[in-house]
Image (tube, coloured by chain):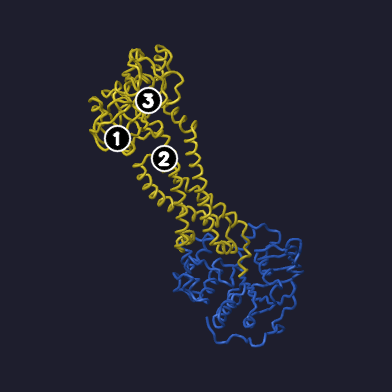
């Protein structure tokens, strides 16, 4: 079985006027199906750039990247969009739900992009919302949902396309600790029970316990990749174990 | 497809109101400017268009209906003898002076006709009949010009070119492009008011016999009558319109105003549609990040533009309808013939969708990585 994501000697350099700012320098990384990987590190270390490249949203400067077994390094924007649609689900820090659509319609939108017929799309959207515990919120608008509920709708939307890979950018940053734990348990379930490769960028040290592997990035390079070596800032513990979805 | 375009529009009522107001403003502006142009154009040739004549016989080199040159009325009998001519009548248009009760003079255009004929008669009569012109000193004028000429009712008498004139009827909506109102009277009396010699006319109007060929009759007239030109009503109408609208500065000014209205309208629509798109830039970025092809995003934006166009057009035409109706009581008519109303729909749609294309350009260049920027 090939890795869900395979990154080899990846570099990314941003051009800012005449200046060249390296964001990633020779990153090597593999993420397996069923694995939950966290990318941590200080701001500006290159985590989000790496996530964007793995998500086929950004092109690398050099190196190679394979997503779901496909070489995507030199793809054109249109082809990258197609890879995103077919293989990747995104969960964003700010939820990025469409405020004018109901929770159900937000999920349906993803299914519409996948050309699922309308009636079948509605049925599947309802099922997905039930899976994240929001079956009764189908007709609620995002403004009427709590932060945790919005993030669960976002997860349902990310899963609607049945992606092999789920990429999340600070999914718990806007949530309280209890809700954040619920979301993280859901993400772990995606990896362990449903076999998705899940990559999460986070600053939140309280969610580290959910990771199968934690990769620390500093100055655009992988500094280390073990959870035990991550320093938890004083005063920040882990989420209480009894929280539920 | 979830109704993203419709919801984007209707979710924010204030933004929707601003967008629709912009489009309504553009529609009304364009309708008024174009309507004025059409109104002025039709006004210039109204006498010809409503003459019921098939052919106009004029002196040579007459450029438009108000600048006819007198010629001998003997040509009338020659014209009547041409095969295919069912009827020929003398017709005069000539400027003369109208003396108001307060002593001030106004310029008017006297129109001399045969009240027993259908050719050249006043139309849209709201009081009196064309046959009433056979009464002594009788004239018919348009009620729009009552204040200008200080006329209030049928039966009043005035003075034109030093001769008595009695109002026997009113028309409604027969405007003059030159601001000199038309005053209808008999041919004989028109000769007197305009100082024309007894044996002269300015035009001869010709009605063809049923089944007669227009070109054959025209050739027949030109063969028998010397020193004249023969135009179809359509030709003479076009000549008059072109003279007033393009040879004089007035028509060009109206045309420029109409073009300016189009440009300003487009800019207003472009701004409002652009702002509507930019308001939802984050969502379009999310769509692109989710893997939506550009065509999907374009469809949402164009649908928003099309819905805005339909609403803006509907309300804009309602407002325009009021403006057009109100203008009927004034000296400058704003006309909105149905082809113009239909054309406005497609123009509004075109303006909104092409304005959307400007904003699409911004969305196309949108970096989907923006979704990771908080």
Residue at mark 3: chain: B
Report which residue position mark 3 lands on. Answer: B94
Q: Position of residue B16 (x, y in %)?
A: 46, 59
- Tell me the residue that label 2 is attached to: B339
The answer to which image quadrant residue B289 occupies is: bottom right
Q: Tell me where residue A103 appears, x and y as whole percent.
A: 48, 69
Mark 2 on the same chain as mark 3: yes
Gap between marks 2 and 3 measured at Cα: 34 Å
**Residues under labels 2 and 1: Cα distance?**
44 Å
Q: Badge 2 sits on which subunit? A: B
Mark earlier in primary sequence (3, 1): 3
Residue located 71% across and 61% down the image: A73
Count how many numbered circles sit on residues in the image. Answer: 3
Q: Which mark, by number, is residue B101?
A: 1
Residue B26, compared with residue A87, is above or below; it is: above
Tell me what hue chain B is rendered in.
yellow
Mark 2 surroundings: few (<14), some (14-19) or many (≥20) residues within 10 A = few
At numbered mark 2, what does the secondary structure look like: helix, strand or loop? Answer: helix
Quadrant location, the C terminus of chain B:
bottom right
Chain for numbered disc 1: B
Tags 3 and 1 on a common chain: yes
* Letter of the chain shown blue in the rendering: A
Asked if one can make out residue A242 in the rendered structure from this viewpoint, the answer is yes
């Amino acid at each position: 079985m090939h890795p869900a994501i395979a990154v080899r000697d990846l570099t990314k350099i941003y051009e800012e006027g005449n200046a060249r700012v390296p964001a990633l320098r020779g990153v090597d990384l593999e993420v397996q199906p069923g694995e939950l990987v966290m990318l941590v590190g200080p701001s500006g270390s290159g985590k989000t750039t790496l996530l964007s490249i793995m998500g086929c949203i950004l092109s690398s400067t050099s190196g190679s990247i394979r997503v779901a077994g496909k070489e995507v390094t030199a793809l054109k924007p249109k082809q990258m969009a197609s890879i995103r649609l077919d293989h990747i689900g995104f969960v964003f820090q700010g939820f990025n739900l469409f405020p004018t659509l109901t929770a159900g319609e937000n999920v349906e939108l993803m299914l519409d992009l996948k050309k699922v017929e309308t009636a079948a799309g509605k049925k599947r959207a309802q099922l997905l919302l039930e899976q994240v515990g929001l079956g009764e919120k189908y007709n609620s608008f995002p403004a009427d949902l709590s932060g945790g509920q919005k993030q669960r709708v976002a997860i349902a939307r990310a899963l609607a396309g049945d992606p092999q890979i789920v990429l999340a950018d600070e999914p718990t940053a806007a949530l309280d600790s209890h809700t954040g734990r619920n979301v993280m348990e859901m993400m772990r379930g995606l990896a362990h029970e449903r076999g998705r490769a899940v990559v999460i960028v986070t600053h939140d040290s309280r969610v580290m316990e959910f990771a199968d592997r934690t990769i620390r990035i500093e100055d655009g390079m992988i500094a280390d990749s073990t959870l035990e070596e991550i320093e938890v800032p004083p005063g920040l513990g882990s989420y209480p174990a009894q929280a539920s979805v | 497809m979830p109704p993203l375009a419709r919801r984007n529009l209707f979710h924010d009522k204030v933004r929707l109101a601003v967008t629709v107001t912009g489009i309504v403003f553009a529609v009304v502006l364009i309708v008024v400017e174009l309507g004025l142009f059409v109104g002025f154009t039709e006004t210039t040739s109204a006498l010809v268009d409503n003459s019921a004549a098939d052919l106009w016989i004029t002196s040579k080199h007459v450029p438009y209906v108000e600048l006819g040159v007198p010629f001998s009325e003997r040509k009338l009998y020659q014209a009547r003898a041409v095969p295919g001519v069912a009827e020929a009548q003398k017709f005069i248009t000539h400027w003369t002076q109208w003396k108001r009760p307060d002593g001030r003079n106004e310029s008017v255009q006297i129109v001399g006709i045969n009240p027993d004929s259908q050719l050249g008669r006043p139309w849209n009569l709201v009081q009196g009949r064309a046959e009433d012109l056979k009464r002594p000193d009788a004239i018919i004028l348009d009620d729009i010009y009552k204040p200008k000429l200080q006329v209030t009712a049928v039966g009043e008498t005035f003075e034109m070119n030093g001769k008595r004139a009695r109002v026997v009827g009113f028309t409604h909506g027969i405007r003059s492009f030159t601001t000199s109102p038309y005053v209808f009277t008999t041919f004989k009396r028109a000769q007197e008011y305009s100082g024309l010699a007894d044996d002269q006319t300015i035009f001869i109007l010709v009605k063809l016999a049923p089944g007669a060929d227009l070109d054959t009759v025209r050739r027949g007239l030109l063969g028998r009558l010397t020193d004249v030109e023969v135009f179809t009503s359509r030709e003479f109408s076009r000549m008059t319109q072109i003279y007033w609208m393009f040879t004089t500065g007035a028509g060009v000014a109206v045309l420029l105003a109409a073009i300016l209205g189009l440009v300003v309208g487009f800019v207003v629509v472009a701004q409002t549609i652009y702002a509507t798109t930019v308001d939802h830039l984050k969502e379009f970025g999310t769509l692109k990040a989710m893997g939506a092809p550009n065509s999907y995003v374009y469809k949402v934006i164009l649908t928003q533009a099309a819905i805005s166009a339909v609403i803006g057009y509907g309300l804009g035409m309602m407002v325009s309808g009021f403006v057009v109706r109100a203008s009927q009581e004034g000296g400058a008519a704003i006309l909105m013939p149905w082809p113009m109303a239909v054309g406005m729909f497609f123009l509004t749609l075109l303006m909104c969708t092409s304005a959307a294309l400007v904003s699409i350009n911004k969305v196309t260049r949108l970096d989907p990585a923006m979704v990771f920027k908080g």
